[in-house]
Image (cartoon, rainbow, N blue to C red):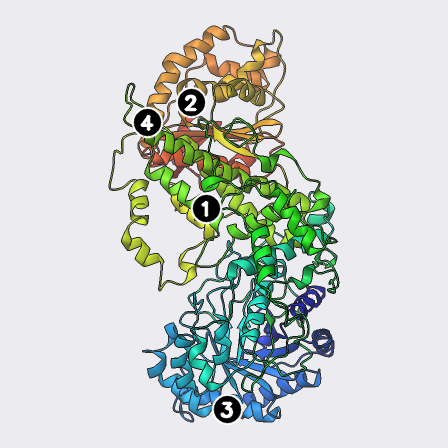
């Protein structure tokens, strides 16, 4: 309820005046629609209606009865009307019937009464409309709600033709556009639908709906809809993200779009309609985004940051799972729902939408907030009312995020709207805001230093932003050093400016940090500038990968220099994302973290692996033994015209699964192994900054100390100090020594601010590696440790390691080596608590092995180490048949690549 109150305040502030209540998770909204609300549920609904009305927001109650309704049944009709009358008695005066995603066929009883589905649905809707006294807002969602679902086309659809003829004129018909999630809407595209329906449609805009992909959230500006579109509509419903905090920028920019539309319709006649599409009211999505970012920074800073890592705060939150409330409505039955939200309580959770039309003069919903010029940002002005910070909003079960918003609903022809704000030319303000807020594609300014203080006037804020801006040519530094993955994670010799000065968590995120967050999670069909640049760099680095360097060749000097520059730019972007994750955890409120952390954490995990793999690519790719079957063949297909045709244009956004994270995943050699990437985020978010990179020569001492410490959490080995000191290295020699000596090329290091905290080691050809270990490494170890330990020490892990050097190595079955030719080993320190970091280690190592032709990997695990077996099992490893023959105390686990 508290989140909805905050949402209603946002709607009022930005001139949006309608909220559709359509909770998919509520049983009495869909499955049990026949059952009336209890007295307690009705009281809660009445309270929600009253809270919306206090903010000048009209609540539209929607009911989905089409799943099992018998249209010819008098009993079902009466039950439907009784349910709607009960809601009307609670104070609701606007209603909607939703028949999307239902079986297009009629039951036998209905076929005997109605000749078509359209006539059956229209009969029920008309009767309910009359029973309610013909309310001013009554919406109808058809089964064919977009051009893609019409057979054969909207103009020739018998279903739509019948609806247009049968439905009463006062009933508004919902339409999503050419697709379920339409990339663009224009008056020309709506002419056909308007002619078929015999009325202007109500657009149900799924641009920001994210419940079809649990890894995506959309924070970009409202775009692809010209302001002149409103002249052909009876309203516009926006289906937003399933997370309240993710909707600040979408709703803010929608309000800006709405104000531009109103200014363009100060005087409107039928003769102006044709010229309207040529002279659109001025609306710039980028300028609207700049304003929204400034406002969101102020909103974030009003939210009091909570301690991010306290178990008292986070332990009560369940692991995110598929949400029942999340609803990208309408959508086809084949669309996969996957948004994750807390479990809501019946009677409180709804789906909000944005409904917009022209407002009559004096409308209480279109006051100063609704008619402000685009150059002003009401929520940043000192005199604007400030809603309670979202940090004060409880996120207890039963009060999950509402979804949507709605603007002015008016069912008459557009009427001029009096602009209650200043009549001064807004152009200077737009230019000032744009110049102050817009950043180059890859800014490296300290995000915290460019942040906003909510108490400062807008002019002072703009000055602060301008003073903090740092412009870079082509988004990267002009001086590039060789790409060396250093401990600070930047890959350069000095720390970048955005990481030099750590801001206090109390100051919140800065403007450039918030901009980066938005551009990483932009829109369904479009990435933000920095996200697009990240993908371009990664694709280019893979397409122009370099094999082992041939001595004396100078012809590739230009390509090598370009590769170094691209690699460094890619590293900088990856480091900024990892830095943003840490800042987001430590500098935001619990409400914001709970809504958005899982998306940023997922991206950070993939970015860690992608960055490490890009660094590993330099000079380590061997000759392709199977050009037609390797991962690079798939990558070449992704660059082909066939892929562009398949993944663009007519495809719905759920074709591109995972957004930016999914595209980076697809570019990795093991990107098709979903079990490596799909994992719930930690219950307690950590702001620890991790770096993942290939092995460097100076890492050996640190890794040895790590392996001989109090224990590697995944290796499950303990350390007992041995007399003489040299035996303390026996654990590290047994775990890592042979890999570092014989196969260092396939070793990756996980590092935090305290130093290395994990490793992933492997070898491409395990059979040859085992032979070298037997004939070269073990003799060396026998000389280093010439005698077996005494009986007391032999019972420890060090003693076991010493005895292993003296014993004959166990043979790996030939069948295992044939099907799983590569050997791997993973280990992390106890302080590396983030499960995503350990998975990134595995992804980087498996990608490197797969890139050079490996088809499968195996590992040797002690049968007594249950949590190690569990960890490998989560990565897709299974116990191999015949693995027991390797030794009674050892299991062989393997997985295909």
CA neighbours of label 1 inside 10 A, class few (<14), some (14 to 19), many (20+): few
Mark 1 or mark 2: name the one nearer the start of the chain.
1
Write down the residue under mark 2: 744
The answer for how far apart the CA atoms under marks 1 and 4 are is: 40 Å
The answer for how far apart the CA atoms under marks 3 and 2 are is: 75 Å
Left or right of 367 in this view: 522: left
- Please tell me whether mark 3 or mark 2 is closer to you in this view: 3
Picture residue at 41% right of the left edge, 36% below the top: 566
Picture residue at 62% right of the left edge, 8% below the top: 723
Write down the residue under mark 1: 675
Q: Which mark is residue 724?
A: none
- Please tell me whether mark 3 or mark 4 is closer to you in this view: 4
Q: Is residue 684 visible?
A: no
Q: Which mark is residue 557?
A: 4
Tags 3 and 1 in contact by the CB under 8 Å rule?
A: no
Q: Secondary structure at mark 4?
A: helix
């Amino acid at each position: 309820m508290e989140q909805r109150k905050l949402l209603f305040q946002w709607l009022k502030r930005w001139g949006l005046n309608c909220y559709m209540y359509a909770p998919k998770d509520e049983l009495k909204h869909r499955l049990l629609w026949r059952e009336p609300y209890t007295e307690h549920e009705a009281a809660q609904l009445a309270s929600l209606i009253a809270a919306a009305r206090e903010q000048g927001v009209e609540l539209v109650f929607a009911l989905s009865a089409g799943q099992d309704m018998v249209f010819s049944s008098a009993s079902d009709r009466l039950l439907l009307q009784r349910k709607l009358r009960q809601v009307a008695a609670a104070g609701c005066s606007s209603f909607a019937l939703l028949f999307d995603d239902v079986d297009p066929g009629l039951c036998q009883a209905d076929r005997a009464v109605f000749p078509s589905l359209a006539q059956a649905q229209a009969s029920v809707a008309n009767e309910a409309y009359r029973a309610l006294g013909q309310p001013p807002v009554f919406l109808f969602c058809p089964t064919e709600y977009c051009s893609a679902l019409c057979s054969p086309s909207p103009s020739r659809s018998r279903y739509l033709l019948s609806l247009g003829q049968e439905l009463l004129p006062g009933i508004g018909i919902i339409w999503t556009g050419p697709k379920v999630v339409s990339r663009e809407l224009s008056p020309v595209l709506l002419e056909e639908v308007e002619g078929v329906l015999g009325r202007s449609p109500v657009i149900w805009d799924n641009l920001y709906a994210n419940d079809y992909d649990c890894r995506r959230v959309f924070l970009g500006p409202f775009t692809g809809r010209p302001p002149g579109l409103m002249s052909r509509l009876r309203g516009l419903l926006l289906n937003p993200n399933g997370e309240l905090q993710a909707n600040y920028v979408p709703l803010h920019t929608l309000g800006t779009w709405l104000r531009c539309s109103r200014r363009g319709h100060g005087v409107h006649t039928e003769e102006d309609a044709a010229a309207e599409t040529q002279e659109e009211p001025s609306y710039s999505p980028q300028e609207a985004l700049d304003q929204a970012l400034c406002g969101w920074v102020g909103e974030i800073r009003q939210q009091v940051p909570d301690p991010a890592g306290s178990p008292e705060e986070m332990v009560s939150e369940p692991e995110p799972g598929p949400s029942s409330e999340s609803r990208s409505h309408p959508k086809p039955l084949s669309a996969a729902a996957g948004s994750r939200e807390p479990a809501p309580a019946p009677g409180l959770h709804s789906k909000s939408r944005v409904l917009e039309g022209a407002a009559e003069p004096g409308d209480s919903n279109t006051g100063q907030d609704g008619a402000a010029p685009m150059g002003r940002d009401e929520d940043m002005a000192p005199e604007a009312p400030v809603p309670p910070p979202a940090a004060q909003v409880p996120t207890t079960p039963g009060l999950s995020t509402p979804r949507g918003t709605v603007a002015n609903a008016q069912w008459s022809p557009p009427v001029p709207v009096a602009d209650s704000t200043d009549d001064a030319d807004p152009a200077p303000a737009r230019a000032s805001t744009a110049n102050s807020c817009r950043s180059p594609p890859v800014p490296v300014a300290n995000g915290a230093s460019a942040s906003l203080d909510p108490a400062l006037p807008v002019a002072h804020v703009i000055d602060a932003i301008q003073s903090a801006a740092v412009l870079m040519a082509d988004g990267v530094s002009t001086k590039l050093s060789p790409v060396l993955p250093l401990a600070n994670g930047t890959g350069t010799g000095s720390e970048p400016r955005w990481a030099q000065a750590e801001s206090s968590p109390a100051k919140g995120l800065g403007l450039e940090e918030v901009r980066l967050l938005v551009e990483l999670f932009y829109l369904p069909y479009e990435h933000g500038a920095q996200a697009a640049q990240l993908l371009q760099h990664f694709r280019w680095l893979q397409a122009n990968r370099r094999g082992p360097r041939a001595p004396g060749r100078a012809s590739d000097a230009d390509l090598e220099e370009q590769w170094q520059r691209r690699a460094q730019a890619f590293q900088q972007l990856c480091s900024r994302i990892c830095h943003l994750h840490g800042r987001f955890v430590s500098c935001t409120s619990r409400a914001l973290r709970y809504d958005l952390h899982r998306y940023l954490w997922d991206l950070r995990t993939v970015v860690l692996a992608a960055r490490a793999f890009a660094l590993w690519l330099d000079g380590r790719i061997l000759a392709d033994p199977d050009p037609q079957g390797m991962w690079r063949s798939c990558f070449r297909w992704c660059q082909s015209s066939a892929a562009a045709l398949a993944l663009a244009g007519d495809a719905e956004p759920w074709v591109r699964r995972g957004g930016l994270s999914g595209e980076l995943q697809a570019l990795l050699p093991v990107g098709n192994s979903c079990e490596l990437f799909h994992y719930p985020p930690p219950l307690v978010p950590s702001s620890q900054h991790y770096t993942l990179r290939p092995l460097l020569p100076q890492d050996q001492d640190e890794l040895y100390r790590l392996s001989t410490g109090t224990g590697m959490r995944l290796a499950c080995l303990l350390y007992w100090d041995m007399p003489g000191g040299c035996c303390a290295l026996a654990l590290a020699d047994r775990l890592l020594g042979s890999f570092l000596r014989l196969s260092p090329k396939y070793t990756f290091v996980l590092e935090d601010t305290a130093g290395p905290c994990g490793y992933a080691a492997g070898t491409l050809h395990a059979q040859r590696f085992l032979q070298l270990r037997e004939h070269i490494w073990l003799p060396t170890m026998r000389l280093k440790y010439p005698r077996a330990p005494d009986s007391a020490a032999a019972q420890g892990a060090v003693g076991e390691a010493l005895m292993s050097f003296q014993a004959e190595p166990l043979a790996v079955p030939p069948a295992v080596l044939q099907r799983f030719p590569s050997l791997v080993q993973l280990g992390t320190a106890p302080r590396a608590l983030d499960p995503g970091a350990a998975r990134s280690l595995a992804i980087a190592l498996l990608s490197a092995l797969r890139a050079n032709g490996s088809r499968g990997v195996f590992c040797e695990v002690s049968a007594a180490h249950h949590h190690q077996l569990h960890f490998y099992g989560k990565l897709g490893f299974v116990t191999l048949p015949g693995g027991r023959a390797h030794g009674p105390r050892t299991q062989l686990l393997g997985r295909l690549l």
